[in-house]
Amino acid sequence: MTDDSTLLGGCRVLDLTDEKGHFCGKVLGDFGADVIKVERPGGDLSRNIGPFYGDIADPQKSLFWFATNTSKRGVTLDIETADGRQIFARLAATADIVVESFEPGYMDAVGLGYSALREIKPDIVMTSITPFGQTGPYAQYQATDLVGVAMGGLARILGELGRPPVRMSCGPQAYFHAGLQGALGSMMAYYHRELTGQGQHVDVSMQEAITLTLMNAVEIYEMLKANLVGLGQFFVSVRPEKGPLFTRLIVPCKDGHVTFMFGGGAFGGVAKSSRALLDWANEEGMAMELKDFDFAQWDASTLTQEESDYRYGLIGEFIKTKTKAELYERAIKDEILLAPCNTMEDISQNAQLQARGFWQVVEHPELGESIAYPGAPVKLEETPWKIHRRAPLIGEHNEEIYAGELGLSKEQIGLLKANGVI
């Protein structure tokens, strides 16, 4: 499959990953690469990750599989067999990138490591996605997504203050971040290959990918020797002398929650926003205790926790009387720093996403219907992003690739299947 109108048209990727790396191949495929998903005979074990379409526990109906394997063709192949290795070598000779997520050393053990692939295709790019990378004392350790999130430091800064850390429940963050970094590394190595003719091995660590998401937690420890811990709905101001100041930025409203900023001092925009919000509350006879407050005098460096809680409490009581829509409409009108905490239903009906054509409807003939998927992460005028096909069924493209591209006969394919190679 070659489509020169896409960003990666003409680039072929062999995707050997499990759940740790599915997202990498999806990103490359949605940007136009011809991604061939290579699964074990019978299908990858990650097909058993729920939830499932129609709540039917079926490896062909995993929504996790649907979401992370769009724009890929799929074949089955046992690369631990001699015939399987030979077939994979033939595929590798046609590929630009190989992505895998086995433990370090596995690909070398089966004779398909980077050094072996370079003998087949000197300029090939190989991307390896593992929990801790190819080297170091943890290289051979195995890890789930939760272990990756914990070892990368993200779990410790999640959760409620004074309670144990928690994981982020909205999808496997370590897997997705590692997959995204794998896609980025693969594309950069591919670009370098196009410029120089040199391939290379891209080594991706889940732990390192997660640590990159910690933002200023790293700098705060480096400068102040203070560990950020689970703060739940709070934003923390680290103050070496006065101690930390906790500010609740997410509060309940009439039909859900909103996030907002309330303060002032040197932050002129926040002061203006806070005054507008307070004026609205005063119009309705609420938060009158703050009516004449000068937000320019707000000093977070000396503010006590009790004073902060008192001010936020007064405005929070007003916010509880309004719906998300009412608050958002007034926020736009009066330039208030406030936004609704959208549910999935809210997002699916969001006017901005609909106006930009964000949602892409993908046909699932095997289900007899179509499903809406999240769309383009970026818009490219000359080389547009798109989901080219739904995730493959088990061995769906065996004949198309093995017979149509490699020239195997029906008899050869039948024998390979009987011997458990495909």
Image: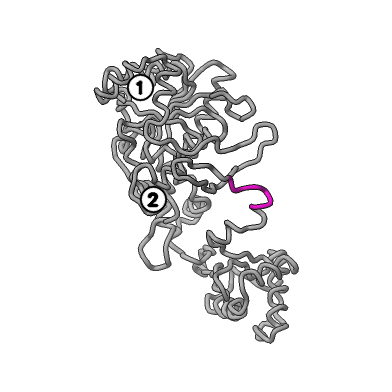
Mark 2 or 1: the one toward you: 2
Magenta-drawn stretch contains 205: no
Amino acid carrying label 1: it is Gly
Count all numbered tags in the image, as a single digit: 2
Residue 342, above or below 102: below
Q: Nearer the viewer, residue 40 or 320?
A: 40
Q: Quadrant of residue 404?
A: top left
Residue found at the far left of this picture? 419
Q: Residue furthest right?
A: 333
Q: Amino acid at mark 2?
A: Phe
Position of residue 124 measured from the top left corner of the image (x, y, whole percent) = 47, 19
On the question of residue 110 being in view, the answer is yes
| Residue at horizontal 58 percent and vertical 57 percent from the top | 347
Could you give the CA–CA distance between mark 2 and mark 1, rounded to whole angstroms? 34 Å
Which of the 4 image quadrants contains residue 21? top left
Residue that mark 2 sits on: 52
Q: Nearer the viewer, residue 218 or 413?
A: 413
Q: Residues within 10 Å of mark 1 (few under 14, many from 20)?
A: some
Compared to residue 107, the image places residue 211 above or below, namely below
Q: Is residue 239 visible?
A: no
Mark 2 or 1 closer to N-term?
Answer: 2
Q: Is disc 1 placed on a helix, strand or loop?
A: loop
Q: Which residues are magenta?
A: 354-360
Q: Is residue 229 above or below residue 398?
A: below
Q: Which residue is mark 1?
A: 113
